[in-house]
Amino acid sequence: MSVGVCYFPEHWPRQRWERDVEQMAEAGLKYVRLAEFSWGRLEPEREQFDFEWLDEAIELIGDHGMEVILCTPTATPPKWLVDERPEILQKDPDGTVREFGSRRHYCFNSPAYREETERIVTRMAERYADNPYVAGWQTDNEYGCHETVRCYCDDCSNAFSEWLADSHDDVETLNEAWGTTFWSQQYPDFEAVEPPGPTPAEHHPSRLLAYYRFASDSVVEYNRLQTEILREVNDDWVVTHNFMGHFDTLDAYDVSKDLDLVSWDSYPTGFVQDRRESEATVEELLAGDPDQVGLNHDIYRGALDRPFWVMEQQPGDVNWPPHAPQPADGAMRLWAHHAVAHGGDAVLYFRWRRCRQGQEQYHAGLRKQDGSPDRGYADASNAAEELFDLDPVDAPVALLHSYENLWATNIQPHAPDFDYWTHAGTYYRALRRRGVQVDVVPPERDLDEYAAVVGPALYLLDNALAARLEAYVEDGGQLLIGARSGEKDTYNKLPDTLQPGPLTDLVCATVAQHESLPEQVPTRVSYDGEEYEYRTWAEWLDPDDATVRGRYAAGQGDGQPAVVDAERGRGRVTYCGVWPGRNLADELAGNLLDRAGVTTHAPLPDGVRVAERDGHVWVTNFTASPVSVDAPADAAWIIGNETVEAYDVGVLEGTLEDVAVTRT
């Protein structure tokens, strides 16, 4: 387990570099990430390269016992390149060109930019092919940030037509699969299917989903161009990319297939403000939401089923959310331990020094712009001393997560507050409140190793996935399926059969009616004799051989089945036709885990989480109140003790069943 930092030596005079690097080493840092936005500094004019400054920085870092993660600098093509080849620039749906002046202004499908990418990446890779201090590479930076996955230029239009032609036998097949007879939307050939620009009404949902898939595939292809170059030059390098949290437009699972290591950028106090439905509490503004961050940890651990890195960890206040309160004392250390508890192997803080120039001057570093330590420096140094090597997380539960289902429900949410992330998070939170480790994985993943599986909103469903889920249950698996599952086929079109379509035989029920409900409509459901709240979405179920476990207790569907169970082979499946409120989600998750024989904790207090990894238990407290840990008298505490203070962490040897956590 290691701690590192992101450093931009090109922002500072050379005479500062040695002291900076000395202080990194003194803090116990192991990795330093370099050069992610440096193209203009490395190549100020075409074919006029200046690598000497980077050579010197790498040498300094290596001489002080640390290793370098280099970045390909393609997120920021320099001005001279834009002027020479303006066709590399992206276009908005209305045709507006995205101009030079910030970052991520290139098009993934531009042949010109792919040519330039191959040139600069090859030149950098060959320069450092035999450098002993370069441990690996990060490709580009945050693919798709600033809404840049989907471009609408002529290159994208041509590439989209080719992508469709590769996906369908002929255009008649496409017209049939999409259902283009609606509103006379038939296409005479693939070239006629253009990127979706401005239109009076909404676009055809099948066309939108196809374009979203194509755009994500374009990033996959562009990333593969870079990884293949790097591996050809030195196949001992570790190659990664830094993804973002709760990011909608890019399928991270697909991109990860070409990586050795998955990493992501974690900013807890920003995420609770700009990518979550509910308003942040004061405690969350100071430390973030452990389940929101944890869900992303588990997505990126699940992408390759191996430990992940946090490539950018929030170091203090940051520049981009609506507000930037100073994080709580100890929060930056807490976040590092929280990442490790979820399967992280390294945490790199962004950045070393607060920058004196450009768009990120209000983004803190571990040290201030004058070189003095900022609040995160001691936290990072303490974390570096405390972390130790661990085996990977062994999770007994899988939560099925799909970017395509996210895209499709975004296209036709059928309720303004139906949000895929929030709906999936309802089930994730219920599992994490029980202290259970969760692998968040794509639906095509092998599920045989899991005692229990949760599938919230398996919206786009085909026969192959249904057959795999049925085999999982028949073989003794315990499955919980959420509302809106089996609603559409893979082209985002209603199938001939009633929902849940291919899952009907498994769940032994169909959906007779559905409704989306605003807040003012009463939403109550009885489940196992108790009444609970639900929200937003309701399906009236028509059971066949299923056992009714829950019925509506209010509204038009009063008395109709809402939750059913069915035994199949040696296992059981539950279908929940509502978006459950917190208490109902807890009951559903608890029942699932109990029948799966999974060891659980009593429901944990809000903001407090427990995680087991490799014979150790982490207690992470994201709140302002201490918590008490009841553990065996002879428990070996690695960090802390029986009282975990505000915004603090405790680590002891043992397993989940050894501990009980309560408010003091």
Image (tube, rainbow, N blue to C red):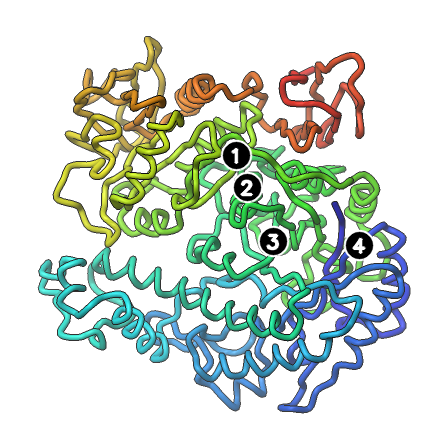
- Judging by the rendered image, the residue that carries numbered circle 1 is 438
Q: Name the residue type under label 4.
A: Lys
Residue extending furthest top?
529
Q: Is residue 155 visible?
A: yes
* Disc 1 residue crowd, few under 14, some 14–19, many 20+, Cα 10 Å: many
Q: Quick one: label 4 or label 3, which is nearer the N terminus?
A: 4
Q: CA distance from mark 1 to mark 2?
A: 7 Å
Q: CA distance from mark 1 to mark 3?
A: 18 Å
* Disc 3 residue crowd, few under 14, some 14–19, many 20+, Cα 10 Å: many
Q: Quick one: label 1 or label 4, which is nearer the N terminus?
A: 4
- Which residue does the image show at 71% across and 39% down from the upper left? 390
Contact (CB < 8 A) between labels 4 and 3? Answer: no
**Could you say which disc has been placed on residue 30 in the image?**
4
* Disc 2 residue crowd, few under 14, some 14–19, many 20+, Cα 10 Å: many
Q: CA distance from mark 4 to mark 3?
A: 16 Å
Q: Name the residue type under label 3.
A: Ser
Residue 582 lies, in percent from the top left, at 43, 24
SS at badge 1: strand
Q: CA distance from mark 2 to mark 4?
A: 24 Å
Q: Quick one: label 2 or label 4, which is nearer the N terminus?
A: 4
- Which residue does the image show at 18% across and 30% down from the upper left? 510
- Judging by the rendered image, the residue that carries numbered circle 2 is 298
Q: Name the residue type under label 1.
A: Val
- Judging by the rendered image, the residue that carries numbered circle 3 is 263
Q: CA distance from mark 2 to mark 3?
A: 11 Å
